[in-house]
Image (tube, helix red, strand yellow):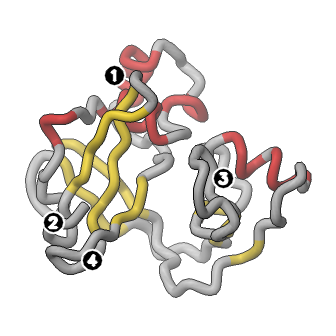
């Protein structure tokens, strides 16, 4: 997480799955964005086989599901995400409603609204589309004031 911006930081968590972050800060400064979900648009059959489900909404809707569907593991730690076989590319510039809400799956700083997602998107992990929307004892979500409005595509060549 202290590497060059645009680098993959892949780690094993909870003893059973990998998560991937994209490093965002200058080298030597810890900072990254956890990739929580993607919308599968290519290679769906391969992802379905890896995940053991044909429900497209469940193929990569969560950080562990995403890495399993994309076959991302420790060998990808340190990968340059701007070029090569695993990369992040600019997506559609369609108007999107980006929401933010409380962080989940952690024990500290859960009050910080640092979880960003597309409002109503079927591939967003479960918590954002159900529990938060219903106000299940958590802070309510709200539109992001951030400037990022493009869809991020994660792809393997």
Decide: marks 2, 1 in contact (CB < 8 A)?
no
The residue pinned by badge 1 equals 46
Residue occupied by mark 3 = 121
Ranked by sequence position, the earlier of labels 4 and 2 is 2
In the rendered image, residue 81, in percent from the top left (x then y), is placed at: 19, 59
- The residue mark sitting in front, 2 or 1, is 2
The residue located at (65%, 70%) in the rendering is: 113
> Nearer the observer, disc 3 or disc 2?
2
C-alpha separation, residue under disc 3 versus residue under disc 4: 28 Å
Q: Secondary structure at mark 1?
A: helix
Indicate whether 97 appears above or below 9.
below
Disc 4 element: loop
In the image, residue 10 lies at what x, y percent? 26, 45
Distance between the alpha carbons at the discs numbered 4 and 2: 8 Å
Judging by the rendered image, the residue that carries numbered circle 2 is 3
Secondary structure at numbered mark 2: loop
Q: Is residue 6 left or right of residue 127?
A: left
């Amino acid at each position: 997480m202290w590497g060059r911006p645009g680098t993959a930081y892949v780690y094993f968590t909870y003893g059973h799955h990998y998560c991937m972050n994209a490093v965002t800060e200058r080298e030597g400064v810890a900072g990254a964005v956890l990739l929580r979900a993607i919308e599968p648009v290519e290679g769906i059959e391969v992802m379905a086989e890896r995940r053991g489900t044909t429900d497209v909404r469940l193929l990569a809707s969560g950080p562990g599901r995403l890495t399993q569907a994309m076959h991302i593991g420790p060998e990808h730690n340190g990968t340059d995400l701007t070029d090569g076989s695993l990369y992040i590319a600019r997506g559609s510039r369609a108007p999107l409603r980006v929401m933010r809400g409380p962080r989940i799956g952690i024990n500290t700083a859960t009050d910080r609204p640092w979880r960003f997602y597309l409002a109503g998107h079927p591939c967003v992990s479960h918590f954002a589309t159900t529990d938060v929307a219903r106000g299940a004892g958590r802070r309510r979500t709200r539109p992001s004031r951030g400037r990022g409005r493009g869809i991020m595509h994660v792809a393997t060549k």
